Amino acid sequence: NLSKYLCWMLYLLAKHQDVQKKVKAEVQKILVTEGAINYGTVTKMQYLEQALKEGLRMHSSPSGFVTRLAEKDIDTGSVVIPKGVSILIPTYILHKDSELWEDPERFDPERFAPGNNKPVEVDSIAFQPFGAGPRNCFAMMFSKVILMLLLAKVLSEYRLVLNDDHHKVSA
């Protein structure tokens, strides 16, 4: 998954030059004040983390599901889920739900800015690219730091741009 998320982030940053510019400025500031990009400094890059979270939200694995077992009967009002039934939560659909996310198709790292807790203030499991709860991905923190390190290193040296034919590529 790391390589998939890295590719999506490189694409999103190339497509959204305004976001790339802000991330590059943050990376350059860290290089000036701290002298290096490493574990200790990359975790200080708030805007880079916001951009990464937004990329993870937008491009969760379409085949990714969080699976849970109903511990009791659940009545949703229109459906009753009996105790013991497996519940599959498709994270891709969850992350694109317009009831949870304002303008969900728009790439907007500001939705993860400190103090902007929507939709998290409404539902703490609305964002779960690595799953949620006690059975979430055990490598979640490692993965986020590795992705941030790779992105910071690339952006410290390069400006990402899309070629004119990028819109012709099919997913």
Image (cartoon, rainbow, N blue to C red):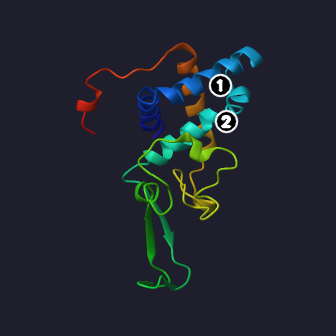
User: Which badge, 2 or 1, comes first in the chain's sequence?
Assistant: 1
**Could you tell me the amino acid type at mark 2?**
Gln
What numbered label is drawn on residue 26? Answer: 1
User: Is residue 88 visible in this depiction of the protein?
Assistant: yes
Category of crowding for the residue at label 2, using alpha-carbon neighbours closer than 10 angstroms: few (below 14), some (14–19), many (at least 20): some
**Could you tell me the amino acid type at mark 1?**
Glu
Give the residue pinned by disc 2: 46
Secondary structure at numbered mark 2? helix
Considering every residue shown, the one lying at the far right of the view is 33
Secondary structure at numbered mark 1? helix
Residue 106 vertical placement versus 92 (above, below):
above
Q: Residue at x 44, y 59 (%)?
A: 98
Residue 76 vertical placement versus 61 (above, below):
below
In this image, 26 relative to 150: left or right?
Answer: right
Q: Position of residue 101 (x, y in %)?
A: 50, 56
Q: Residue at x 47, y 33 (%)?
A: 9
Q: Are marks 2 and 1 in contact (CB under 8 Å)?
A: yes
Q: Position of residue 28 (x, y in %)?
A: 65, 18
Q: Position of residue 52 (x, y in %)?
A: 55, 38
Q: Residue at x 69, y 33 (%)?
A: 43
What numbered label is drawn on residue 138? Answer: none
The Cα atoms of the two marked residues, 2 and 1, are separated by 8 Å
- For the C terminus, give its image quadrant: top left
Rendering quarter of residue 119: bottom right
